[in-house]
Image (tube, rainbow, N blue to C red):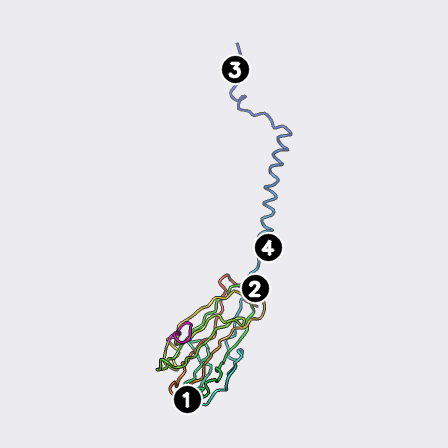
Amino acid sequence: MTEEMPDDAEATPPPPTRRTVVRAAAWSLPVIAAAVATPLTAASTAALPACAFLPATSAAWALEDPRSGRNQDAGANNSWRTVDGRLGYRQYNDNFYRVTNAAAVDYVSAITATFDAVAGVTYVFTFSLLGNLAAATTQVVTTMDVAVGGIRQQRFSTKPAQSAGTQVPIGPVNATTGSQQFSLTWIAPSSGPTTFEYIWTMPPVAATGITYNDDIWVSLPLISQPDGCVPSA
């Protein structure tokens, strides 16, 4: 008669051989190496750039009035004013720059400041605009360009049919409400000090017939960085 083995004897596995132990150790090595490499990859993540800013005082902006063309005539009233609670500049030139010479050059004025840009970083400039529209629909119109790094990003005017651009909101002269907020996005092509400019251009006004130019007010811009930044000390 054949003797039956006890149940517990069948369930007991044989002891591991030396070859089995070595093979298991070899398979575990890559897992350990991967765990060690993870912190090194995380440490190499690029740090956020410093937050960029533009000055909020008129003394820190360069005023060019004019940048080109004639000097202001009597009665011109370009000046630093407030737009929706933030300091800004007003181009206000009713009955300004009357000429009889059809070949006269445009009158151009500008305010300029710089900020520190970092290559590849996205910057968003936000500002408020307010316009005053003269009655004549055929008048010569003032335009205002927003330029970053010497390149125009957007042109604004109160009569887009006469000068391609985005129409600014219309409000009464000397008002500080009723403006509209605009934003433009710019990606820095290189690092270093970069100019931000508001540039107003006004063609000559004829001695008869057309008599007014529109007024455009703008607040100094605020800069935001959608991907985040670190405030400078």
Q: Quadrant of the C terminus?
A: bottom right
Compare residues 165 and 168 and report the one nearer the observer: 165
CA distance separating discs 2 and 4: 19 Å
Q: Residue at x 57, y 60 (%)?
A: 47
Residue at 37 percent of width and 82 percent of height:
134
Q: Closer to the observer: label 1 or label 2?
A: 1
Front one among 206 and 11: 206
Q: Which residue is mark 2?
A: 119
The residue wearing badge 4 is 44
State the residue position of label 1: 207
Q: Are marks 1 and 3 in contact (CB under 8 Å)?
A: no
Q: Percent x, y for residue 16? A: 61, 28
Mark in front: 1 vs 4: 1
Disc on the earlier residue, 3 or 2: 3
Q: Amino acid at mark 2?
A: Ala
**Numbered tag placed on residue 193 in the rendering:** none
Q: Which residues are magenta?
A: 160-169
